[in-house]
Amino acid sequence: MADDCVLRELREDDRPFVAKSWLESFAGSHDAGPIPMHLYRPVYRAAIAWLIGRSDSKTIVACSAENDSLILGWSCGGNTSRHGKVLHYVFVKSWYRRRGIATSLIAALGLAPAEPFIYTYRTPLWRELRNSRSWGRGKWNPLAARFRTEDPYVPSVPDLPDQANPGR
C-alpha cells in the first residue's frame, strides 16, 4: 500500500461518502439486478445502511496520511456465523487504484488471499482483484448478505402491494 495512505475504522462522518460511492459505483453494474431506477436509491440505501451497521460487519477506510478526512477508498465485510468470512464491497477512487489500497482494505477485514471467502457484490474493482492470482479464492454468493436472524432487515421504503393477494 502507498506510504501516503493509512487505514482506520469507519467514523460517523464517513457514512455519507461510503453510501454515495457505493450507490453510484454499483448503479451501473449488471449485478444491480432488475430494480427500477426510481426504486434503486431507496432500496440500496437501506441495504447499505443495514450492511454497514450489522454486528458481524465492519467498514475500514483508507485515507490520506496527511488528512484523515480525505477518503481514498473503503471496504465493508466481516465474519458471519453462517457463511464465515465475507466481503460485501470494496471501493477505491479511480486515481488511487493499482497502489495496493484495495488489497490492504480487504486484508484489514481479516480476509487472506490464500483462504476461501464469500463476496456478496460483484463490482468492477472486484473483477480486477478476482482475476489476480492473489485474490482468486473468493466465491460469489449474494445471499450471504441477506439472511441473518440476529439483525432483521427492516426496509425504510414502503411495502409494495401484494399483487397475488389483493387487499393484503
Image (tube, rainbow, N blue to C red):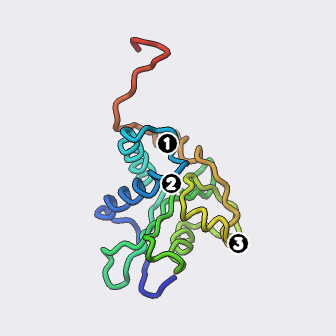
Quarter of the image where one finds residue 112: bottom right
Quarter of the image where one finds residue 68: bottom left
Residue that sits furthest to the bottom in the current view: 3
Nearer to the camera, 17 or 32 = 32
137 up-or-down from 37: above or below: below
Q: Percent from the top left, x then y, of residue 143?
A: 59, 43
Residue lying at 38% horizontally and 65% vertically, measured from the top left: 10
Please identify, in this view, whether the residue under mark 2 or under mark 3 is nearer the observer.
Answer: 3
- Indicate the quadrant containing the C terminus: top left, top right, bottom left or bottom right: top left
Quarter of the image where one finds residue 107: bottom right
Where is mark 2, residue-wise? Answer: 56
Instruction: Give, as a three-letter code, the residue at label 1.
Output: Glu
Q: Percent from the top left, x then y, of residue 141?
A: 63, 49
Disc assigned to residue 107:
none
Q: Residues within 10 Å of mark 1 (few under 14, many from 20)?
A: few
Nearer to the camera, 143 or 122 = 122
Compute the Cα span from label 2 to label 3.
28 Å
Tell me whether the residue at label 1 lies in contact with that at label 2, contact meaning CB atoms closer than 8 angstroms.
Answer: yes
Where is mark 3, residue-wise? Answer: 133
Which numbered disc flags the more N-terminal residue, 2 or 3?
2
Residue lying at 28% horizontally and 64% vertically, measured from the top left: 13
Disc assigned to residue 150:
1
Q: Residues within 10 Å of mark 2 (few under 14, many from 20)?
A: some
Which numbered disc flags the more N-terminal residue, 1 or 3?
3
Compute the Cα span from label 1 to label 2.
10 Å
Which element carries disc 1, helix, strand or loop? loop
Residue lying at 44% horizontally and 67% vertically, measured from the top left: 74
